Image (tube, rainbow, N blue to C red):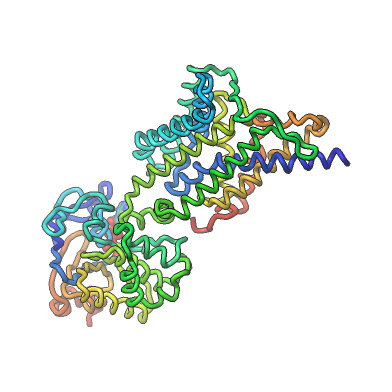
Amino acid sequence: MEQLLVIGERVVIFSVLVSALYALVALGFTMIFGVGRVLNLAHGAFLMVGAYTAWFAQRAGVDLYLAAALAVLVCTLLAVALYQGLIRHVQHSVIITLIATLACALLLEEIIKIFFTTTPQILQPFISGSIVLHQTTIISNRVLAFVASWVAIVLFWLFVHRTRWGKVILATAQDQEGAALVGINVRHVYTVTWALSGALAGLAGVFFASWVNLSPFMWRDPLIISFAIVVVGGLGSLKGSIIAAYLIGFLEVLMTYSPSIKFCADYRCFEFLGASWVGVPSLIMLVLILFLKPSGLFGRAHE
Amino acid sequence: MLRIENLHVYYGKAHVLKGVSLHVAPGEFVAVIGPNGAGKTTLFRTISGLKEHHHGVIAFKDAPLPKDPAQIVRRGVIHCPEGRHLFGDMTVRENLEMGAFRWDHRDMSDDLERVYALFPVLRERERQIARTLSGGEQQMLAIGRALMGRPELLLLDEPTLGLAPIVRKAIAEALQQINQDGVTILLAEQNVAFALADARRVYLLETGQIVKVGTPEEFRADEHVRRVYLGGV
Ligand SMILES: Nc1ncnc2c1ncn2[C@@H]1O[C@H](COP(=O)(O)OP(=O)(O)OP(=O)(O)O)[C@@H](O)[C@H]1O
Ligand SMILES: [Mg+2]
Protein backbone atom coordinates (compact mmCIF):
# COMPACT_ATOMS: atom_id res chain seq x y z
CA MET A 1 0.00 0.00 0.00
CA GLU A 2 2.76 2.37 1.02
CA GLN A 3 4.58 1.26 -2.08
CA LEU A 4 1.58 2.12 -4.19
CA LEU A 5 1.32 5.63 -2.77
CA VAL A 6 4.95 6.24 -3.62
CA ILE A 7 4.34 5.07 -7.17
CA GLY A 8 1.27 7.25 -7.39
CA GLU A 9 3.27 10.23 -6.24
CA ARG A 10 5.96 9.60 -8.83
CA VAL A 11 3.48 9.12 -11.63
CA VAL A 12 1.91 12.47 -10.81
CA ILE A 13 5.19 14.35 -10.43
CA PHE A 14 6.87 12.89 -13.49
CA SER A 15 3.83 13.25 -15.71
CA VAL A 16 3.42 16.88 -14.67
CA LEU A 17 7.07 17.47 -15.56
CA VAL A 18 7.22 15.61 -18.84
CA SER A 19 3.84 16.83 -20.09
CA ALA A 20 4.95 20.46 -20.05
CA LEU A 21 7.82 19.45 -22.30
CA TYR A 22 5.40 17.57 -24.55
CA ALA A 23 3.27 20.68 -24.84
CA LEU A 24 6.35 22.64 -25.89
CA VAL A 25 7.34 19.90 -28.32
CA ALA A 26 3.94 20.08 -30.01
CA LEU A 27 3.59 23.86 -29.95
CA GLY A 28 5.31 24.65 -33.24
CA PHE A 29 3.76 21.66 -34.95
CA THR A 30 0.28 22.73 -33.85
CA MET A 31 0.84 26.30 -34.99
CA ILE A 32 1.92 25.33 -38.51
CA PHE A 33 -1.04 23.01 -38.76
CA GLY A 34 -3.44 25.61 -37.41
CA VAL A 35 -2.26 28.46 -39.61
CA GLY A 36 -1.28 26.77 -42.86
CA ARG A 37 -2.98 23.36 -42.58
CA VAL A 38 0.43 21.77 -43.10
CA LEU A 39 1.41 18.62 -41.21
CA ASN A 40 5.14 19.12 -40.86
CA LEU A 41 6.58 15.62 -40.52
CA ALA A 42 10.03 17.17 -40.23
CA HIS A 43 9.07 18.74 -36.89
CA GLY A 44 10.70 15.97 -34.86
CA ALA A 45 13.79 16.26 -37.03
CA PHE A 46 13.96 19.98 -36.21
CA LEU A 47 14.07 19.00 -32.53
CA MET A 48 16.86 16.58 -33.33
CA VAL A 49 18.84 19.24 -35.17
CA GLY A 50 18.35 21.54 -32.18
CA ALA A 51 19.62 18.91 -29.77
CA TYR A 52 22.62 18.04 -31.94
CA THR A 53 23.49 21.70 -32.51
CA ALA A 54 23.57 22.30 -28.76
CA TRP A 55 25.54 19.10 -28.19
CA PHE A 56 28.05 19.94 -30.93
CA ALA A 57 28.55 23.47 -29.63
CA GLN A 58 28.91 22.16 -26.11
CA ARG A 59 31.55 19.67 -27.26
CA ALA A 60 33.41 22.56 -28.87
CA GLY A 61 33.53 24.23 -25.48
CA VAL A 62 30.61 26.63 -25.83
CA ASP A 63 28.59 27.36 -22.73
CA LEU A 64 25.23 25.51 -22.81
CA TYR A 65 23.11 28.66 -22.63
CA LEU A 66 24.85 30.01 -25.69
CA ALA A 67 24.65 26.57 -27.30
CA ALA A 68 20.89 26.54 -26.72
CA ALA A 69 20.57 29.96 -28.34
CA LEU A 70 22.55 28.63 -31.28
CA ALA A 71 20.22 25.64 -31.53
CA VAL A 72 17.21 27.97 -31.65
CA LEU A 73 18.87 30.05 -34.36
CA VAL A 74 19.85 27.05 -36.49
CA CYS A 75 16.36 25.54 -36.28
CA THR A 76 14.72 28.86 -37.13
CA LEU A 77 16.83 29.17 -40.26
CA LEU A 78 16.28 25.53 -41.15
CA ALA A 79 12.49 25.89 -40.85
CA VAL A 80 12.43 29.06 -42.97
CA ALA A 81 14.67 27.42 -45.57
CA LEU A 82 12.40 24.38 -45.75
CA TYR A 83 9.34 26.59 -46.13
CA GLN A 84 10.80 28.96 -48.70
CA GLY A 85 12.70 26.35 -50.64
CA LEU A 86 10.13 23.60 -50.76
CA ILE A 87 6.86 23.71 -48.81
CA ARG A 88 5.72 27.04 -50.27
CA HIS A 89 5.64 25.43 -53.70
CA VAL A 90 3.85 22.22 -52.74
CA GLN A 91 1.62 23.41 -49.89
CA HIS A 92 -1.52 23.18 -52.02
CA SER A 93 -1.19 19.39 -52.14
CA VAL A 94 -1.53 17.59 -48.81
CA ILE A 95 0.10 14.40 -50.08
CA ILE A 96 3.12 16.08 -51.65
CA THR A 97 3.61 18.14 -48.48
CA LEU A 98 3.55 15.00 -46.34
CA ILE A 99 6.08 13.30 -48.60
CA ALA A 100 8.30 16.37 -48.80
CA THR A 101 8.43 16.92 -45.04
CA LEU A 102 8.98 13.21 -44.35
CA ALA A 103 11.77 13.17 -46.93
CA CYS A 104 13.32 16.14 -45.15
CA ALA A 105 13.19 14.28 -41.84
CA LEU A 106 14.83 11.19 -43.34
CA LEU A 107 17.46 13.34 -45.02
CA LEU A 108 18.33 15.00 -41.72
CA GLU A 109 18.53 11.55 -40.10
CA GLU A 110 21.04 10.46 -42.77
CA ILE A 111 23.08 13.63 -42.40
CA ILE A 112 23.31 13.13 -38.65
CA LYS A 113 24.34 9.50 -39.21
CA ILE A 114 27.11 10.56 -41.58
CA PHE A 115 28.53 13.27 -39.35
CA PHE A 116 27.90 11.91 -35.87
CA THR A 117 27.31 8.15 -36.41
CA THR A 118 24.50 6.28 -34.70
CA THR A 119 26.26 6.22 -31.34
CA PRO A 120 23.98 7.78 -28.69
CA GLN A 121 25.32 11.02 -27.26
CA ILE A 122 24.61 12.85 -24.06
CA LEU A 123 24.01 16.56 -23.71
CA GLN A 124 25.48 17.76 -20.46
CA PRO A 125 22.68 19.31 -18.35
CA PHE A 126 22.19 23.01 -17.62
CA ILE A 127 22.25 22.22 -13.94
CA SER A 128 23.42 19.00 -12.35
CA GLY A 129 22.20 17.21 -9.27
CA SER A 130 18.74 16.31 -8.16
CA ILE A 131 16.16 17.40 -5.66
CA VAL A 132 14.06 15.26 -3.39
CA LEU A 133 10.37 15.96 -3.13
CA HIS A 134 8.82 13.91 -0.35
CA GLN A 135 9.60 10.34 -1.49
CA THR A 136 10.58 11.21 -5.06
CA THR A 137 13.97 12.13 -6.44
CA ILE A 138 13.87 14.45 -9.42
CA ILE A 139 16.77 15.40 -11.67
CA SER A 140 17.10 19.19 -11.35
CA ASN A 141 17.67 19.66 -15.06
CA ARG A 142 14.23 18.23 -15.73
CA VAL A 143 12.66 20.70 -13.35
CA LEU A 144 14.42 23.41 -15.31
CA ALA A 145 13.05 21.95 -18.55
CA PHE A 146 9.57 22.02 -17.01
CA VAL A 147 9.83 25.64 -15.92
CA ALA A 148 11.37 26.75 -19.22
CA SER A 149 8.65 24.94 -21.18
CA TRP A 150 5.93 26.76 -19.28
CA VAL A 151 7.69 30.09 -19.68
CA ALA A 152 7.94 29.49 -23.44
CA ILE A 153 4.28 28.46 -23.65
CA VAL A 154 3.08 31.51 -21.72
CA LEU A 155 5.27 33.87 -23.77
CA PHE A 156 3.96 32.29 -26.94
CA TRP A 157 0.38 32.70 -25.77
CA LEU A 158 0.98 36.35 -24.94
CA PHE A 159 2.56 36.87 -28.35
CA VAL A 160 -0.38 35.36 -30.19
CA HIS A 161 -3.15 37.00 -28.19
CA ARG A 162 -1.65 40.31 -27.14
CA THR A 163 0.39 41.56 -30.08
CA ARG A 164 -0.57 42.85 -33.48
CA TRP A 165 1.51 40.18 -35.21
CA GLY A 166 -0.20 37.52 -33.16
CA LYS A 167 -3.60 38.81 -34.25
CA VAL A 168 -2.46 38.72 -37.85
CA ILE A 169 -1.42 35.08 -37.43
CA LEU A 170 -4.77 34.25 -35.82
CA ALA A 171 -6.66 35.98 -38.63
CA THR A 172 -4.72 34.05 -41.25
CA ALA A 173 -5.40 30.80 -39.39
CA GLN A 174 -9.12 31.54 -39.27
CA ASP A 175 -9.55 32.62 -42.87
CA GLN A 176 -6.65 32.82 -45.23
CA GLU A 177 -8.65 34.50 -47.96
CA GLY A 178 -10.22 36.97 -45.56
CA ALA A 179 -6.71 37.81 -44.37
CA ALA A 180 -5.47 38.45 -47.91
CA LEU A 181 -8.47 40.69 -48.56
CA VAL A 182 -7.74 43.00 -45.63
CA GLY A 183 -4.21 43.43 -46.93
CA ILE A 184 -2.29 40.82 -44.95
CA ASN A 185 0.57 39.28 -46.89
CA VAL A 186 -0.27 35.65 -46.26
CA ARG A 187 3.13 34.44 -47.50
CA HIS A 188 4.89 36.59 -44.90
CA VAL A 189 2.64 35.20 -42.19
CA TYR A 190 3.50 31.66 -43.22
CA THR A 191 7.20 32.46 -43.20
CA VAL A 192 6.91 33.93 -39.71
CA THR A 193 4.98 30.91 -38.41
CA TRP A 194 7.61 28.56 -39.81
CA ALA A 195 10.37 30.61 -38.23
CA LEU A 196 8.58 30.58 -34.88
CA SER A 197 7.86 26.90 -35.14
CA GLY A 198 11.53 26.23 -35.89
CA ALA A 199 12.63 28.33 -32.93
CA LEU A 200 10.25 26.50 -30.59
CA ALA A 201 11.45 23.15 -31.96
CA GLY A 202 15.08 24.11 -31.36
CA LEU A 203 14.31 25.03 -27.78
CA ALA A 204 12.23 21.90 -27.26
CA GLY A 205 15.09 19.83 -28.72
CA VAL A 206 17.55 21.12 -26.15
CA PHE A 207 15.18 20.29 -23.31
CA PHE A 208 14.13 17.00 -24.83
CA ALA A 209 17.77 16.02 -24.55
CA SER A 210 17.42 16.29 -20.78
CA TRP A 211 15.16 13.22 -20.95
CA VAL A 212 16.77 11.17 -23.70
CA ASN A 213 20.09 10.50 -25.33
CA LEU A 214 20.81 12.01 -28.71
CA SER A 215 20.60 9.68 -31.67
CA PRO A 216 19.77 9.99 -35.37
CA PHE A 217 16.44 8.31 -34.62
CA MET A 218 15.38 10.60 -31.79
CA TRP A 219 13.04 12.58 -34.09
CA ARG A 220 10.39 9.88 -34.16
CA ASP A 221 9.00 10.10 -30.63
CA PRO A 222 8.55 13.88 -30.64
CA LEU A 223 6.82 13.64 -34.01
CA ILE A 224 4.40 10.98 -32.77
CA ILE A 225 3.79 13.01 -29.62
CA SER A 226 3.11 16.17 -31.63
CA PHE A 227 0.83 14.33 -34.00
CA ALA A 228 -1.17 12.78 -31.19
CA ILE A 229 -1.43 16.10 -29.40
CA VAL A 230 -2.78 17.86 -32.47
CA VAL A 231 -5.34 15.13 -33.11
CA VAL A 232 -6.42 14.85 -29.49
CA GLY A 233 -6.34 18.56 -28.73
CA GLY A 234 -8.07 19.69 -31.88
CA LEU A 235 -6.94 21.76 -34.78
CA GLY A 236 -4.60 24.54 -33.78
CA SER A 237 -6.10 24.99 -30.32
CA LEU A 238 -3.45 25.99 -27.78
CA LYS A 239 -5.58 25.17 -24.76
CA GLY A 240 -6.52 21.85 -26.33
CA SER A 241 -2.88 21.03 -27.03
CA ILE A 242 -1.82 21.63 -23.45
CA ILE A 243 -4.60 19.49 -22.04
CA ALA A 244 -3.85 16.82 -24.63
CA ALA A 245 -0.16 16.97 -23.73
CA TYR A 246 -0.99 16.36 -20.09
CA LEU A 247 -3.37 13.52 -20.95
CA ILE A 248 -0.81 11.80 -23.14
CA GLY A 249 2.09 12.47 -20.79
CA PHE A 250 0.14 11.05 -17.88
CA LEU A 251 -0.84 7.91 -19.78
CA GLU A 252 2.74 7.35 -20.85
CA VAL A 253 4.16 7.71 -17.39
CA LEU A 254 1.44 5.40 -16.10
CA MET A 255 2.34 2.87 -18.80
CA THR A 256 5.97 3.08 -17.80
CA TYR A 257 5.21 2.39 -14.20
CA SER A 258 2.61 -0.35 -14.35
CA PRO A 259 4.95 -3.12 -15.54
CA SER A 260 7.87 -1.93 -13.45
CA ILE A 261 6.36 -1.58 -10.02
CA LYS A 262 8.87 -3.96 -8.55
CA PHE A 263 11.85 -1.74 -9.15
CA CYS A 264 10.15 1.51 -8.45
CA ALA A 265 12.48 2.12 -5.56
CA ASP A 266 14.99 3.26 -8.13
CA TYR A 267 13.94 6.52 -9.74
CA ARG A 268 16.05 5.64 -12.75
CA CYS A 269 13.35 3.27 -13.92
CA PHE A 270 11.88 6.42 -15.29
CA GLU A 271 14.45 6.39 -18.07
CA PHE A 272 11.66 5.24 -20.28
CA LEU A 273 11.73 7.50 -23.27
CA GLY A 274 13.09 5.65 -26.23
CA ALA A 275 11.53 2.45 -25.00
CA SER A 276 9.79 0.97 -27.98
CA TRP A 277 6.26 1.03 -26.56
CA VAL A 278 6.31 4.51 -25.23
CA GLY A 279 4.29 5.87 -28.16
CA VAL A 280 1.57 3.30 -27.65
CA PRO A 281 -0.72 5.35 -25.38
CA SER A 282 -0.49 8.25 -27.80
CA LEU A 283 -1.46 6.02 -30.68
CA ILE A 284 -4.34 4.45 -28.76
CA MET A 285 -5.61 7.90 -27.79
CA LEU A 286 -5.25 8.99 -31.36
CA VAL A 287 -7.34 6.16 -32.75
CA LEU A 288 -9.97 6.51 -30.02
CA ILE A 289 -10.35 10.23 -30.61
CA LEU A 290 -10.51 9.77 -34.35
CA PHE A 291 -13.42 7.41 -33.82
CA LEU A 292 -15.25 9.29 -31.09
CA LYS A 293 -14.64 12.92 -31.96
CA PRO A 294 -12.77 13.42 -35.22
CA SER A 295 -12.45 17.17 -34.69
CA GLY A 296 -10.41 16.60 -31.51
CA LEU A 297 -11.47 17.19 -27.92
CA PHE A 298 -11.52 20.94 -28.43
CA GLY A 299 -11.98 21.16 -32.18
CA ARG A 300 -15.07 22.46 -33.85
CA ALA A 301 -17.18 20.19 -36.00
CA HIS A 302 -17.08 22.25 -39.17
CA GLU A 303 -13.31 22.32 -39.48
CA MET B 1 -11.22 54.54 -62.35
CA LEU B 2 -11.24 50.80 -63.11
CA ARG B 3 -10.59 49.67 -66.66
CA ILE B 4 -10.53 46.04 -67.71
CA GLU B 5 -9.62 45.07 -71.23
CA ASN B 6 -9.82 41.73 -72.95
CA LEU B 7 -9.46 39.69 -69.78
CA HIS B 8 -8.99 35.94 -70.16
CA VAL B 9 -9.02 33.64 -67.14
CA TYR B 10 -8.70 29.88 -66.99
CA TYR B 11 -9.21 27.23 -64.32
CA GLY B 12 -6.86 24.60 -65.68
CA LYS B 13 -8.14 24.08 -69.19
CA ALA B 14 -11.57 25.58 -68.54
CA HIS B 15 -11.77 28.98 -70.19
CA VAL B 16 -13.95 30.90 -67.73
CA LEU B 17 -13.54 34.57 -68.70
CA LYS B 18 -13.30 34.99 -72.45
CA GLY B 19 -12.19 38.49 -73.21
CA VAL B 20 -14.08 40.58 -70.65
CA SER B 21 -13.82 44.36 -71.00
CA LEU B 22 -15.48 46.85 -68.71
CA HIS B 23 -14.88 50.19 -67.07
CA VAL B 24 -16.08 51.97 -63.97
CA ALA B 25 -15.87 55.74 -63.59
CA PRO B 26 -15.13 57.43 -60.23
CA GLY B 27 -18.22 57.58 -58.03
CA GLU B 28 -20.24 55.17 -60.15
CA PHE B 29 -22.41 52.30 -58.90
CA VAL B 30 -22.04 49.55 -61.48
CA ALA B 31 -23.45 46.02 -61.37
CA VAL B 32 -22.34 42.89 -63.15
CA ILE B 33 -25.25 40.52 -63.56
CA GLY B 34 -25.38 37.02 -64.90
CA PRO B 35 -26.63 33.53 -64.13
CA ASN B 36 -24.86 30.97 -61.90
CA GLY B 37 -21.49 30.07 -63.27
CA ALA B 38 -21.27 33.06 -65.62
CA GLY B 39 -17.95 34.06 -64.08
CA LYS B 40 -18.85 36.99 -61.81
CA THR B 41 -16.95 35.68 -58.82
CA THR B 42 -14.02 34.74 -61.02
CA LEU B 43 -13.96 38.29 -62.41
CA PHE B 44 -13.91 39.80 -58.90
CA ARG B 45 -11.29 37.38 -57.64
CA THR B 46 -9.11 38.25 -60.59
CA ILE B 47 -9.43 41.98 -59.94
CA SER B 48 -8.45 41.56 -56.27
CA GLY B 49 -5.51 39.32 -57.13
CA LEU B 50 -6.79 36.08 -55.60
CA LYS B 51 -6.82 34.52 -59.07
CA GLU B 52 -4.18 35.07 -61.71
CA HIS B 53 -5.19 36.02 -65.24
CA HIS B 54 -3.87 34.67 -68.44
CA HIS B 55 -4.19 37.63 -70.68
CA GLY B 56 -5.59 41.15 -70.53
CA VAL B 57 -5.30 44.44 -68.68
CA ILE B 58 -6.64 45.45 -65.28
CA ALA B 59 -5.90 49.12 -64.65
CA PHE B 60 -6.92 51.17 -61.62
CA LYS B 61 -6.60 54.95 -61.85
CA ASP B 62 -4.63 54.53 -65.09
CA ALA B 63 -1.96 52.26 -63.60
CA PRO B 64 -1.95 48.48 -63.83
CA LEU B 65 -2.89 46.76 -60.58
CA PRO B 66 -0.14 44.76 -58.86
CA LYS B 67 -0.42 40.96 -58.65
CA ASP B 68 -0.34 40.57 -54.88
CA PRO B 69 -3.74 40.89 -53.11
CA ALA B 70 -2.15 42.73 -50.17
CA GLN B 71 -0.72 45.36 -52.55
CA ILE B 72 -4.05 45.72 -54.34
CA VAL B 73 -5.76 46.43 -51.01
CA ARG B 74 -3.19 49.15 -50.41
CA ARG B 75 -4.19 50.78 -53.68
CA GLY B 76 -7.72 51.17 -52.30
CA VAL B 77 -9.46 48.33 -54.15
CA ILE B 78 -11.28 46.30 -51.53
CA HIS B 79 -13.15 43.10 -52.17
CA CYS B 80 -16.03 41.93 -50.00
CA PRO B 81 -16.10 38.31 -51.14
CA GLU B 82 -18.79 35.77 -51.83
CA GLY B 83 -19.09 33.65 -48.69
CA ARG B 84 -17.93 36.61 -46.53
CA HIS B 85 -14.67 35.06 -45.28
CA LEU B 86 -14.94 36.60 -41.83
CA PHE B 87 -12.52 35.76 -39.03
CA GLY B 88 -14.92 33.33 -37.39
CA ASP B 89 -13.39 33.13 -33.90
CA MET B 90 -12.89 36.86 -33.53
CA THR B 91 -15.45 39.31 -32.23
CA VAL B 92 -17.34 41.78 -34.40
CA ARG B 93 -15.06 44.53 -33.15
CA GLU B 94 -11.89 42.55 -33.86
CA ASN B 95 -13.07 41.75 -37.37
CA LEU B 96 -13.63 45.45 -38.01
CA GLU B 97 -10.21 46.29 -36.59
CA MET B 98 -8.59 43.71 -38.87
CA GLY B 99 -10.39 45.41 -41.76
CA ALA B 100 -8.29 48.49 -41.04
CA PHE B 101 -5.09 46.43 -41.18
CA ARG B 102 -3.59 48.45 -44.01
CA TRP B 103 -3.73 51.63 -41.92
CA ASP B 104 -1.40 50.18 -39.30
CA HIS B 105 -1.76 52.02 -36.03
CA ARG B 106 -3.93 54.89 -37.12
CA ASP B 107 -6.88 55.91 -34.96
CA MET B 108 -9.95 54.21 -36.35
CA SER B 109 -12.70 55.43 -34.06
CA ASP B 110 -14.22 57.57 -36.86
CA ASP B 111 -14.25 54.61 -39.23
CA LEU B 112 -15.88 52.43 -36.57
CA GLU B 113 -18.51 55.11 -35.95
CA ARG B 114 -19.29 55.27 -39.66
CA VAL B 115 -19.76 51.49 -39.87
CA TYR B 116 -21.89 51.43 -36.72
CA ALA B 117 -24.03 54.27 -38.10
CA LEU B 118 -24.65 52.24 -41.26
CA PHE B 119 -25.31 48.98 -39.41
CA PRO B 120 -26.41 49.77 -35.83
CA VAL B 121 -26.84 46.06 -35.06
CA LEU B 122 -23.06 45.67 -35.25
CA ARG B 123 -22.60 48.09 -32.38
CA GLU B 124 -25.01 46.05 -30.25
CA ARG B 125 -23.10 42.90 -31.12
CA GLU B 126 -19.62 44.38 -30.80
CA ARG B 127 -18.41 41.65 -28.44
CA GLN B 128 -20.13 38.73 -30.15
CA ILE B 129 -18.04 36.07 -31.92
CA ALA B 130 -18.48 36.48 -35.68
CA ARG B 131 -19.24 32.82 -36.28
CA THR B 132 -22.34 33.05 -34.07
CA LEU B 133 -23.95 35.97 -35.95
CA SER B 134 -26.97 35.45 -38.19
CA GLY B 135 -26.41 35.38 -41.95
CA GLY B 136 -27.60 38.96 -42.37
CA GLU B 137 -25.43 40.23 -39.54
CA GLN B 138 -22.42 38.39 -40.95
CA GLN B 139 -22.98 40.04 -44.29
CA MET B 140 -23.20 43.46 -42.66
CA LEU B 141 -19.99 42.71 -40.81
CA ALA B 142 -18.29 41.67 -44.04
CA ILE B 143 -19.29 44.96 -45.67
CA GLY B 144 -18.27 46.85 -42.55
CA ARG B 145 -14.87 45.16 -42.50
CA ALA B 146 -14.34 46.11 -46.15
CA LEU B 147 -15.28 49.73 -45.35
CA MET B 148 -12.73 49.84 -42.53
CA GLY B 149 -10.07 49.58 -45.21
CA ARG B 150 -11.36 52.91 -46.62
CA PRO B 151 -12.00 51.63 -50.14
CA GLU B 152 -11.93 53.88 -53.16
CA LEU B 153 -13.38 51.03 -55.18
CA LEU B 154 -15.53 48.50 -53.33
CA LEU B 155 -16.12 45.11 -54.96
CA LEU B 156 -19.24 43.44 -53.57
CA ASP B 157 -19.94 39.86 -54.57
CA GLU B 158 -23.61 38.95 -54.07
CA PRO B 159 -24.03 40.72 -50.72
CA THR B 160 -27.70 39.85 -50.33
CA LEU B 161 -27.69 36.23 -51.45
CA GLY B 162 -30.05 34.17 -49.32
CA LEU B 163 -31.13 37.02 -47.04
CA ALA B 164 -34.67 37.93 -46.00
CA PRO B 165 -36.26 40.85 -47.91
CA ILE B 166 -36.08 43.17 -44.90
CA VAL B 167 -32.37 42.53 -44.41
CA ARG B 168 -31.79 42.88 -48.13
CA LYS B 169 -33.49 46.27 -48.00
CA ALA B 170 -31.30 47.43 -45.13
CA ILE B 171 -28.17 46.41 -46.98
CA ALA B 172 -29.33 47.98 -50.26
CA GLU B 173 -29.94 51.27 -48.44
CA ALA B 174 -26.51 51.09 -46.83
CA LEU B 175 -24.93 50.56 -50.24
CA GLN B 176 -26.63 53.70 -51.58
CA GLN B 177 -25.32 55.61 -48.58
CA ILE B 178 -21.79 54.27 -49.08
CA ASN B 179 -21.90 55.25 -52.75
CA GLN B 180 -23.16 58.76 -51.89
CA ASP B 181 -20.26 59.08 -49.46
CA GLY B 182 -17.97 58.85 -52.48
CA VAL B 183 -17.08 55.15 -52.66
CA THR B 184 -17.19 53.69 -56.16
CA ILE B 185 -19.04 50.37 -56.18
CA LEU B 186 -18.86 47.35 -58.44
CA LEU B 187 -21.55 44.84 -57.50
CA ALA B 188 -21.98 41.24 -58.66
CA GLU B 189 -25.56 40.05 -58.57
CA GLN B 190 -27.47 37.17 -60.04
CA ASN B 191 -30.80 38.60 -59.00
CA VAL B 192 -31.34 40.96 -61.90
CA ALA B 193 -34.25 42.81 -60.35
CA PHE B 194 -32.07 43.77 -57.35
CA ALA B 195 -29.19 44.88 -59.53
CA LEU B 196 -31.44 47.03 -61.71
CA ALA B 197 -32.87 48.68 -58.60
CA ASP B 198 -29.48 49.39 -57.01
CA ALA B 199 -27.01 50.23 -59.79
CA ARG B 200 -26.76 53.13 -62.21
CA ARG B 201 -25.15 51.09 -64.97
CA VAL B 202 -25.23 47.34 -65.63
CA TYR B 203 -23.13 44.76 -67.45
CA LEU B 204 -24.62 41.42 -68.40
CA LEU B 205 -22.12 38.57 -68.21
CA GLU B 206 -23.04 35.24 -69.82
CA THR B 207 -20.65 32.27 -69.91
CA GLY B 208 -17.60 34.46 -69.54
CA GLN B 209 -18.51 37.19 -71.98
CA ILE B 210 -20.09 40.61 -71.62
CA VAL B 211 -23.15 40.45 -73.82
CA LYS B 212 -24.82 43.72 -72.93
CA VAL B 213 -24.17 46.97 -71.12
CA GLY B 214 -26.63 49.75 -70.34
CA THR B 215 -28.69 51.63 -67.78
CA PRO B 216 -31.34 49.82 -65.74
CA GLU B 217 -34.00 51.44 -67.96
CA GLU B 218 -32.37 50.04 -71.08
CA PHE B 219 -32.18 46.60 -69.46
CA ARG B 220 -35.85 46.66 -68.47
CA ALA B 221 -36.75 47.54 -72.04
CA ASP B 222 -34.62 44.74 -73.52
CA GLU B 223 -36.56 41.76 -74.87
CA HIS B 224 -33.83 39.15 -74.03
CA VAL B 225 -33.33 40.45 -70.50
CA ARG B 226 -37.10 40.56 -69.82
CA ARG B 227 -37.66 37.06 -71.10
CA VAL B 228 -34.67 35.32 -69.52
CA TYR B 229 -33.97 37.29 -66.34
CA LEU B 230 -37.12 39.13 -65.34
CA GLY B 231 -39.58 36.29 -65.83
CA GLY B 232 -41.33 38.02 -68.72
CA VAL B 233 -42.66 40.95 -66.66
N1 LIG C 1 -11.71 26.92 -58.26
C1 LIG C 1 -12.30 26.57 -59.43
N2 LIG C 1 -11.82 25.53 -60.13
C2 LIG C 1 -12.39 25.17 -61.30
N3 LIG C 1 -13.43 25.79 -61.85
C3 LIG C 1 -13.96 26.83 -61.20
C4 LIG C 1 -13.43 27.26 -59.96
N4 LIG C 1 -14.15 28.33 -59.54
C5 LIG C 1 -15.08 28.53 -60.48
N5 LIG C 1 -14.98 27.65 -61.48
C6 LIG C 1 -15.83 27.59 -62.68
O1 LIG C 1 -15.82 28.83 -63.30
C7 LIG C 1 -17.10 29.16 -63.78
C8 LIG C 1 -17.50 30.53 -63.26
O2 LIG C 1 -17.68 30.44 -61.87
P1 LIG C 1 -17.97 31.71 -60.96
O3 LIG C 1 -17.95 31.28 -59.55
O4 LIG C 1 -17.07 32.80 -61.35
O5 LIG C 1 -19.46 32.06 -61.39
P2 LIG C 1 -20.47 33.11 -60.77
O6 LIG C 1 -20.95 33.94 -61.88
O7 LIG C 1 -19.88 33.81 -59.63
O8 LIG C 1 -21.64 32.17 -60.28
P3 LIG C 1 -22.61 32.31 -59.01
O9 LIG C 1 -23.67 33.28 -59.37
O10 LIG C 1 -23.18 30.94 -58.83
O11 LIG C 1 -21.78 32.76 -57.85
C9 LIG C 1 -18.02 28.05 -63.36
O12 LIG C 1 -18.21 27.21 -64.48
C10 LIG C 1 -17.27 27.33 -62.29
O13 LIG C 1 -17.55 25.96 -62.29
MG1 LIG D 1 -20.30 33.91 -57.65
Residue B80 in percent (x, y) is at 30, 64
Q: Using residue B196 as the reference point, say whether residue B125 is left or right of it.
A: right
In the image, what residue occupies the spot 19% across and 70% down? B30
Taking the image as drawn, is residue B227 in sight?
Answer: no
Please state the horizontal and vertical placement of residue A299, each as a whole percent of the image: 54, 55
Q: Nearer the viewer, residue B233 or A15?
A: A15
Tell me the quarter of the picture where residue A228 sits. top right
What is the x, y in percent for residue B88? Answer: 44, 61
Residue at left offset 58%, top offset 51% = A240
To which quarter of the image does residue B73 belong? bottom left
Measured as percent of width and height from the top left, residue A152 is found at 54, 43
User: Nearest the camera: A50 or B51?
Assistant: A50
Residue A96 in view, yes or no: yes
Q: Please, which residue is most extreme toward the left here?
A: B62
In the image, is A189 to the left or to the right of A274? left
Outermost residue toward the right?
A1
